[in-house]
Amino acid sequence: MGRTLAEKIWSSHVVRPLDDGADLLYVDLHVLHEVNTPRAFDDLRASGRTVRRPDRTLAVEDHNTPTRDGALEDLAGRRQRELIRANCAEFDIQLHRLGDADQGIVHVIVPELGLARPGMTIVCCDSHTSTLGALGVLAFGIGTGQVEHVLATQTLPVHRPKDLAVEVSGVLPDGATAKDLALALIAQIGTGGGQGSVIEYRGEAIRRLSMEGRMTLCNMSIEAGSRAGLVAADDVTIDYLRARPAALGKGEDFAAAEARWRGMRSDDDARFDDVVHLDATRVGPRVSWGTNPAQNLLIDGRVPSRTDFATAEDWASAERSMDYMGLRPGQVVRDLEVSTVFLGSCTNGRIEDLREAASVLDGRRVADGVRMLIVPGSAAVRRQAVDEGLDKVFDAAGADFRAGAGCSMCCALNEDRLAPGERAASTSNRNFEGRQGKQSRTHLVSPRVAAATAVSGHFTTPEDL
């Protein structure tokens, strides 16, 4: 019987099986950020251990980094950055710190720098490490307590997840994006639909996605409850890596690397534990209405009513979400007004996302009473946006195009937060209670919808403008 892509990567990295049924898995790259690492370094010191492979460890500052010039720094955030700088210096770990040319959100800069390649294993104390699965990488988040183990041994004891295939037939219609595809999938299978699994995305619609679109899709695999997302290498992957010389090993020939990368795919007779089918032709612009990513619907829809739910338990959950979000059953989604639009995050903070927003904002203005934050996912993304003149489009539209790169309002661990009760359209990946600030109300959307909504002040598609 053939093997899945996830199984191939996994088996090639098993150091040895463990007695409890788990495997000791070798880690090709371990990435750190400032929020979840201080304890791991303290534990290393306490146990007298060192970092096993500092050459296969990379640190970034992204969650707590201020992105606005002159912003008052959060004292806790500044302390975390001071600690990661001191720890990286002590243990000889490369750090992309605030102000560096290669600084940015961890899941944005790793592929930019050519550090993610098909067949690798990459871990980080951040669930959205799954983003890197777009490049055929088995990439997943680990817990705070596991960080020390990887630092000390370059291995991780872990049980192998199940294999879930998501077969996406047809082609996405004009105006539908990878973000909408991700939301449509989560609406279909729920936030627990991928639990305990690695999702492999397959089908014509996936093959037609850009690398940035694939990253968005794999990023939001976590919101479907899965451990990771994967897309097998193809021409899109090879073209992306060809533009990044660092993707090659020392003395490695690109042709040989390409042949190896193209071989990293599921066998035709591979058997998955489960298969989900999704029709891309029925995907359109979507907006989340509740407090988990599965609570989303087409932008032309209405906030659900009792008859939309099969059980009283589901309806009770929906009522709680509506109460928090300040919504009523039957409200038209397009009528919901927002006061803030956030464009950024590891989901949608790449150059393609900024280009999409600029194409909508060009020649238009952000509506009165609405603030639009555009935060690049990396310093490199910002430089490219300036080189392409996107910054002039954003400035002319009245959007706040940030000077710095980072997570910004996505996680609200910095100066960017929503006020209590404030409603926002956001291109991030999570919308749980308080995600973007205490009592904040977050609606997840694509960059296209975010930009159009900023112009109109309520949920809108570019075609409506």
Image (cartoon, grey):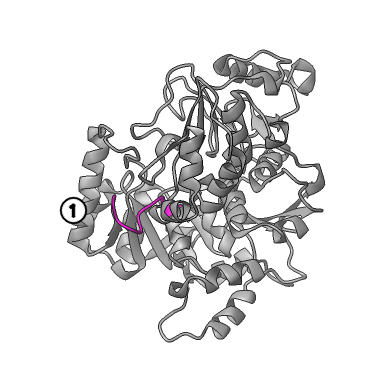
- The reply to whether residue 205 is in sight is yes
SS assignment for the magenta stretch, majority:
loop
Residue 278: percent from the left, percent from the top?
Answer: 78, 47
Image vertical order of residue 42 relative to residue 299, above or below: below
Residue 381: percent from the left, percent from the top?
Answer: 45, 53
Image vertical order of residue 290 relative to residue 384, above or below: above
Quadrant occupied by the N terminus: bottom right
Q: Which residue is mark 1?
A: 86
Image vertical order of residue 114 relative to residue 286, above or below: below
Residue shown at 70% from the left, 19% from the top = 315
Residue shown at 67% from the left, 46% from the top = 177
Task: Compare residues 366 and 157 and report the one nearer the observer.
Answer: 366
Residue shown at 63% from the left, 21% from the top = 317
Residue shown at 43% from the left, 65% from the top = 113
Task: Compare residues 134 and 166 and report the one nearer the observer.
Answer: 134
Q: Is residue 428 left or right of residue 89?
A: right
> Given the image, on which type of amino acid does mark 1 rest?
Ala
What segment carries the magenta color? 98-107
Task: Classify mark 1: helix, strand or loop.
Answer: helix
Q: Is residue 78 left or right of residue 416?
A: left
The quarter of the picture where residue 167 lies is: bottom right
Task: Indicate whether residue 247 is drawn in magenta.
Answer: no
Task: Compare residues 235 and 93 and report the one nearer the observer.
Answer: 235
Residue 137: percent from the left, percent from the top?
Answer: 54, 64
Residue 106: percent from the left, percent from the top?
Answer: 41, 53
- The reply to whether residue 48 is in sight is no
Quadrant occupied by the C terminus: top right
